[in-house]
Image: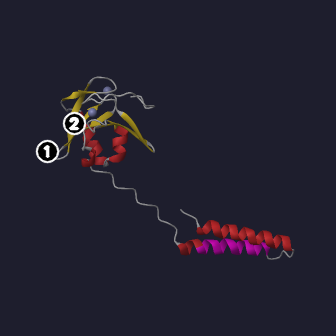
Amino acid sequence: MNATGPTEYQCPVCAAVLALRCEPGVFVWACDRCGGLLMSVAVLRMIAEDDWSRELWSATADSPPASSACPECGRAMVAAQVGPRTAPVAMDVCRGCLLVWLSAGMIERIPQKPPTPPKEEMSQRSREALAALQVKMIADRYSKQEDQDSRLRWISRVLRIILRIISLRV
Ligand SMILES: [Zn+2]
Ligand SMILES: [Zn+2]
């Protein structure tokens, strides 16, 4: 597959030209006419639960041919199904091009990867303690200096450090 895009892919179902949609780090091709979505296996793996992605990929090994042709290579895709037999998520996959075609509404049925937990924010108290410590270190260093210029420089430096620490995000 041509990862550089945008490629004039045609919808494998209704033959409309697919529109390239970019999100940061992710791009998919969407059919405005039938609502289908074409994406790389890599993008699907970013969205879907890991177990589910593995199950999908192993399902493609012995899936029957789909009626749709791969928009990239033109060969028949395979009709893979994942999930319970009563309500499987169905999609067409080209194993050669690593492309997945999801018909309208299918993406909502894919079990999504849990969001990565937000990094613990440094508490206000630790930030203030860190600021106080740095201020003390600078104060110790400059405590013996008598002249006015040094003192002013010292104060502005301390202020900068406090501002930085207070707004610090880790
Ligand atoms: Zn379409
Ligand atoms: Zn293909």
- Front-lying residue, 13 or 72: 13
Q: In the shown orientation, is residue 165 left or right of residue 137?
A: left
- Tell me: 149 left or right of 12: right
Query: What kind of element bears circle 1?
Result: loop
Q: Position of residue 65 (x, y in %)?
A: 20, 28
Q: How would you classify the magenta stretch by its main secondary structure? A: helix
Residue 140 magenta: yes
Residue lying farthest to the left in this orientation = 86
Q: Residue at x 63, y 72 (%)?
A: 131
In-front residue for pair 25/116: 25
Q: Is residue 77 magenta?
A: no
Q: Quadrant of ligand 2?
A: top left
Tally the numbered discs: 2
The part of the image, by quadrant, that contains residue 138 is bottom right
- Residue 98 is labelled as none
**Quadrant location, the N terminus:** top left
Towards the viewer: 134 or 163: 163
> Which of the 4 image quadrants contains residue 22?
top left
Instruction: Give the labeled residue for mark 2.
Output: 80
- At x 31%, y 47%, the residue is 48
Residue 6, percent from left and from top:
43, 31
Which type of secondary structure does the marked residue at label 2 adopt?
strand
Tell me residue 79's x, y (percent): 21, 33
Q: Residue furthest front?
A: 33
Residue carrying label 1: 85
Q: Residue at x 28, y 47 (%)?
A: 51
